[in-house]
Each structure stands twice: as C-alpha cells, then as structure tokens.
Amino acid sequence: MKLQQLLSLTRKAIEEYSMIDDGDKIAIGISGGKDSLALLYALSNLRRFYPKHFDIEAVTVSTGIDGMDFTQIANLCKELGVNYTIVNTQIYEIVFNARKESNPCSLCAKMRKGAFNNQAIELGCNKIAYAHHKDDLVESLMMSLIYEGRIHTFSPVTHLEKSNLTLIRPLLYINEADIIGFKNKYNLPVVKNLCPADGFTKREYASNLIKEINHESPGAKNRIFSAIINGNLEGFPERKRTER
C-alpha cells in the first residue's frame, strides 16, 4: 500500500464518521507496532492539506519491559515534525510480578489507557486516536460473540465521559495486510513487543479463527465488516456516505 492510498482511506473514515473538527488536538497512541506507526504517518501527512486544521501529539506508554527501545520512533517523529512523549510506568512490574495476573492483558490495557489519557489531557488534547483497523473491528465482534454472548464491537468514534476525551479510529477501512505492505514499503521502525503474553491472547485466537473462516469462504471477513458498519449497531455514530 502506498501513502496516497493510506491517506485516501484514512480521510474516508474521518469524513464518514466526522472524526476531526477545526482546532482539534489529537494524541496518537504509539505502541511501536506497525498499526500505530501507519496511523502516525497518515495523520501527520493529512494535517498538511486537510481542510479542517488540527494538531497531533505522539504518545507512547512504556510499561517498563526491559529491552524495548523507542529511539527510532523518536527519530521518525522528529522527521515528521511531530512532538513525541514517552510516559514511563511500572505497569509490567505491577501486572506480572506484584499481582501475578492470570489474565494480564485486561489489567495492563486498563492501566495503559489511563496513563495515555492522563498524558493526552496534560498535553492539551481534546481527542485521542487508536490505530484499530478493519481486522480489529471484525475480531472484536467475534470476541464479543464467543466470550460475552452479545453482538458488539468498538465504535469508530467514542466520547469518554470520565476524561472528556473523544476517541477516534481513523484506520477503520484499512486491512491489516495493507498495513503490513505499507510497513515494508516505507521501512517503518517497528519496535518488537517483548511482552510474554503477546501471541497468546483471546484476540489472537479470534484472529486465527477469522482467517480460517475467510480461507474456507473467501470474502467472509469483508462481508462481516459490511454487516457491522451497515447494521446500525448500538453506539455507532451516523455514517455520512462519501465517494472516494
């Protein structure tokens, strides 16, 4: 995937779900993975010509795992002209050593989100952006069906009442496979996730299940995605159709 396609699909999601307004200041959650770096590229380039003026901040919440180095991401942010903040925490120590969580992902995610939101507010941001893509949307639906017994997935736009921040997901229309292609083409400085729970999560199970279904019934993933965005699910904002 080329940068032009990344920008086109990102802009489509932003406009169809009214994600950005004039004067917004948006904190981008940078995990170090390919998805968040693609989002960084998209919003840093889009702000140069998008008709609504907005600013961005890049924020990484470091969980305190030894060996994770974000120097190359700091260099990329400098190259793109984006202010970069690393929030150092002891989340890993608390989750794995102090509490010895049998299901560490839930608590870790909650603590990372809290640290990220607090930093976004401190930086004067009114919105935050996550790099969830099309595959994530479908996987979240599958997880809700299997583990919660309900038809639910995340919304493209969510207002967080407790922090008064608005969460947006501009990569909604982009396939993970295309992000992988973008990462390879533009040599994104991905930081390997050293968490011991990585690759052994419920989401990983859902991801593999969807791949198997899509292999047996080609196009199934896209049909599920279409069913979600056209299904008037609870919590979904009104969608404005655009031609792009």
Image (cartoon, grey):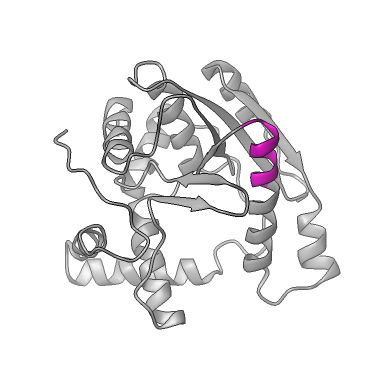
Query: How many numbered discs sit on the rendered protein?
Result: 0
Q: What residue span does the magenta drawing correspond to?
A: 116-124
Q: Position of residue 90 (x, y in %)?
A: 81, 53
Residue 122 seen by the camera: yes
* Camera-nearest residue between 178 and 164: 164
> In the picture shown, does residue 211 fall above or below 41?
below
Q: Position of residue 56 (x, y in %)?
A: 53, 27
Q: Quadrant of residue 196?
A: bottom right
Residue at screen point 49% across, 51% down: 159
* Camera-nearest residue between 172 and 76: 172
Q: Is 169 left or right of 230, judged from the image as shown?
A: right
**Furthest-bottom residue in this view:** 149
Q: Quadrant of residue 9?
A: top left
Q: Is 104 left or right of 231, judged from the image as shown?
A: right
Residue 187 seen by the camera: no
**Furthest-left residue in this view:** 243
Q: Quadrant of the N terminus?
A: top left
Residue at screen point 63% across, 52% down: 113
Q: Quadrant of the C terminus?
A: top left
Residue at screen point 62% across, 67% down: 106
The stretch drawn in magenta includes residue 96 = no
Task: Considering the whole magenta stretch, tell me its main secondary structure.
Answer: helix
**Furthest-right residue in this view:** 98
> In the picture shown, does residue 188 fall above or below 63?
above
Q: Is 161 left or right of 104, judged from the image as shown?
A: left
Q: Position of residue 119 (x, y in %)?
A: 69, 39
Residue at screen point 26% across, 31% down: 8
Q: Position of residue 52 (x, y in %)?
A: 37, 23
